[in-house]
Amino acid sequence: MKRITIYDVAKEADVSLATVSRVINGSEVVREDTRIKVQEAIEKLGYKPNAIAQGLALQKTTTIALIVPEASYFYTGQIINGLIDVAKIYKYNIMLHTTTEGITEMNDIIENIIKSRVDGVVIFNDKLNKEELNQLTRYQVPIVVIGNKMSDDTVGSVYVDYANLVYEYASGCIKQGKKNIALVEDRKNPQMIKQLLDGLNRAFEEQGMKFESFIQIPKEYRSSYLFLKEYMKQGIRHDVVITYRDSQAMAVMNTAKEAGISIPDEMELICILDSKYNAMARPQISGFKIPDYDLGAVAMRLLTKMLHDENEVTDKEIELSYIYTPRKSTK
């Protein structure tokens, strides 16, 4: 089947290529009767304008760059789905950039993004520093950051307040007399751990205490499990242990069992980032349902508003809620 081109439309409508291009790109300098004639030719022939060509004419690419860390694919899957669904509604394409710790230089990604002349950028990367963000904002590219609260003239954010999440949970535990609360370090998510530490410190300080049970994983240990196995054997007991990811929660559960510690009878376990695997574990692990799909969808919608100056977007810091899901690892 012959591919319909802009030349076919021009011939059918008996106008110039330039006129067809102006109609496609919404130019106001075309007479109404000519516009109707061109649109009728487009419908009759079933012509589909090339998005790239349209972008060049409009000085836009209809492309959004998405930056995600490779290590978090499992956790960003639903975020990406939400983002793509909204991008389709507003006819944007997504260009995915991944970062790999120790391999990918963020400056290289930024350079590629700038060369691609994308319309906007969505970033899910808790290791992006202020200097790198400033480098992008210098090019006046609208940016939405997922996960961290921040805003500027060209920067917006969609986030869950993890500090407040753990503050509320820890405050409730302390009121119940469970004051020996521990947090397991997650070396792959340092920014998230910092937020959790901020929340724990606040909860303890309000009760005139100091949070001191931060379980740091030494660099010489390749996994949390290997260190926690030795840690639990020392006979150290906590009322509650908090982890960020499910894999660490399972490492705590398994090493506690190997050390003869019963969960939840002798020690409770909570995983901040809930997943289907928490429900499959035995005992099932309590966690918080984070609206990951909504994080992506709302981030993309915010970006479209910033791109189109919809009433000069006033709220560029959008906080989403979370739901506590109690299971068998807590009392």
Image (tube, helix red, strand yellow):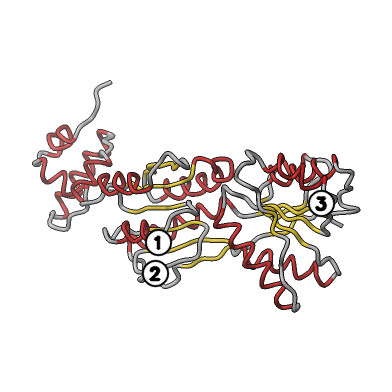
Point out residue 87 in the picture as x, y percentages from the top left corner.
Answer: 42, 48
Of residues 13 and 83, which is closer to you in this image? 83
Q: Is the residue under label 2 in contact with that under label 3 (CB below 8 Å)?
A: no
Q: Residue at x 37, y 53 (%)?
A: 121
Residue 107 % position (x, y): 33, 48
**Above or below for 8 versus 136:** above
Q: What quarter of the picture does the N terminus occupy?
A: top left
Which callout, 2 or 1, points at the residue further toward the start of the chain? 1
Amino acid type at image mark 2: Val
Q: Quadrant of residue 258?
A: top right
Quarter that holds the C terminus: bottom right
Give the mark toward the camera: 3 or 2: 3
Residue 277's image quarter? top right
**Which SS class for mark 3?**
loop
Nearer to us in this view, 174 or 301: 174
Residue 313, numbered circle: 2
Which of the two labelled residues, at mark 1 and mark 3, occupies the earlier sequence position?
1
Horizontal relation, residue 137 to residue 27: left or right: right
Q: Earlier in the sequence, mark 3 or mark 2?
A: 2
Q: Tell me the mark number nearer the camera, choosing from 1 and 3.
A: 1
Occupied quadrant, residue 193: bottom right
C-alpha distance separating marks 3 and 2:
40 Å
Quickly name the residue at label 3. Answer: 327
